[in-house]
Amino acid sequence: MHMKNVAKMAFAAMTAVLLLAACGTGGNSQSGSGKVDVKTTGFPIVSKNLKMTMMAPSTGAAKWDDMAVLKDYAKKTNVTLKYNTPPMSDFSTKLNLAFASQDLPDIIYAASSDNLTATKEVTYGTNGQLLPLEKLIPKYAPNFNALMKKNPDIRRSITAPDGHIYALPMVAVNAYASWQNNPMWYNGAWLKKLGIKELPKTTDEFYDLLMKFKNDDPNGNGKQDEIPLSDTKLASIRTWLMAAFGLLTQDVQNDGNKVFYTPITTQYKAYLTYMHKLYANGLLDKDTFAQSDDQRKAKGQSNRLGVYADYFSYFTSGKTPNQAVEDPMWQPLTSPESTKAVVPLNNGLNRGNFALTKNNPSPAASLRWVDYFYSKKGSDYLNNGPEGVYWVYAKNKEGKKVRVLAKGINESNSEDKRSKITPDYGLTTPSLVFDNDSDPVLVSANAPTGGGLNAFLRKETKDKILPYAKQGFPMVYLTSSEQDSISSITNDLKTYVEQSEAKFITGVTPLSDWDKYVSTIKGMHVDQYVKVYQAAYDRWKNAK
């Protein structure tokens, strides 16, 4: 399985001056490619070799100079890059230093919204350190432009309040792109042992099944050591179980065009009441708020977990990918507070993954360079590399030419080998992520295509997520004044809500203190917080 694992508003005149200055520094204009001859189609991208610098986070798997994809792509494009790749753990600090010192690379790549945040995008864009890209995209990034035309929410979600696009995202359209969080999985062997044919569809049915997991010895060892439901600090299961009560975020949510704060609603109180009931009756792991992810997984590998969350179930269960088809995905629940099943929908975007600085010698060539990866052919090339390195052609028993893992690469070491040939491993690269069933890289020439775990996961997603999925709140930008008005509120609210959640669920704080909890949040200026996000939502909704 491939691992892909606010703002500052400037006056229009000031923005224009800054952008002209930024373009002048790099010898470019926003309407073209400066002195560099950039081809609008095919390879190479430029007739004369173009040298640029790139800053990106490194997973440590290999030096980027040695990666086969990047070496081959340099030959294809006639663009030579010098890489500055700090470790992922240091990248945010190094990127901040680069902006502060004005010692900027030409391209910032795969930074993700965690490092090149929405706030930084617009702050550095409006002060001229990042270049606006929207005027160049139609001509020099036609693949990405086509994605925006197909899904207008992409443009809405990457356009800053001043109307500029300062960074390109990763766009995921594969089956897993709809997952807001790691899905929840049932222990299939336990269901079989207990003769469970139908998965729970209500909170009461879910409670009853968890009680059976606890009391009926489904792991068959004669001990009551089963843990019906487990997580680490509710980081994964929270969103799915809150959805049973009609809530899609533990933050702002929009109901139609009206924005509200979910942690002070009656539905949220019902969620806390239900989770406390699970905890008090020994159904929610007593270690949930204290254990590490590795500790939780160890319980799964000891066959002690009934329901848990992970990207793929076998990451927790310790089974093989092929065995994972025995563990069904959790079915969305309804409750008296929410009689229609709903689950949170991920919009499939990760922002901040390709930005150009004022030093860039050719924004047009840079966009051409990245745009290939927004096509299916280019995305596959980025993911799997050129022929002869990670994969080779072979003929299957029908005589059809198929792609198979190269010599020395097998199912057990394939991801390790792939991590050394491409940056598209463990990073949110600026690219299109799609289901590549039509021409996958097979383990061997006669391996089946489109089956196994992938097919199972797609069907589970199609049946159990997509019919119920709804976006809780879109990706928005805040203006500088909006950001300033809630900067001291944001973290205080998040911290207080999460701490209170743990206390209510474990019983440290009784649910009879609910009104006091709501009063405390209102005293933290939550009304101002909601007002800001209402304005941001309205801008997003009305963007042309």
Image: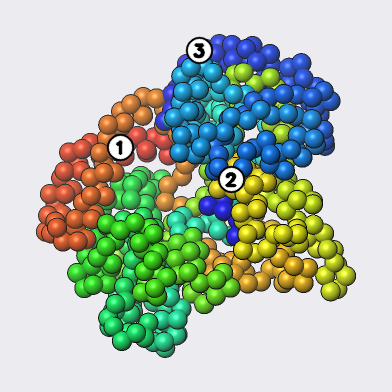
The residue lying at 68 percent from left, 46 percent from top is 421
Q: CA distance from mark 2 to mark 3?
A: 44 Å
User: Which residue is under mark 2?
Assistant: 61
In-front residue for pair 392/113: 392
Residue 409 in the image: above or below residue 499 = below
The residue lying at 20 percent from left, 43 percent from top is 521
The residue lying at 37 percent from left, 72 percent from top is 305
Q: Earlier in the sequence, mark 3 or mark 1?
A: 3
User: Which residue is under mark 1?
Assistant: 490
Occupied quadrant, residue 1:
bottom right
| Label tally | 3
Occupied quadrant, residue 48:
top right
Residue 182: image location, x then y, percent: 45, 59
Q: Residues within 10 Å of mark 2 (few under 14, many from 20)?
A: some
Give left or right: position of 311 versus 106. Answer: left
Task: Look at the numbered disc 1 and give the secondary structure of its residue.
Answer: helix
Residue 456 got which mark?
Answer: none
Task: Look at the numbered disc 2 and give the secondary structure of its residue.
Answer: loop
> In the displayed image of the protein, which residue is found farthest to the right?
399
User: Which residue is under mark 3?
Assistant: 14
Residue 388 in the image: above or below residue 324 = above
Residue 107: image location, x then y, percent: 61, 28
Pointer 2 and pointer 1: residues touching (CB < 8 Å)?
no
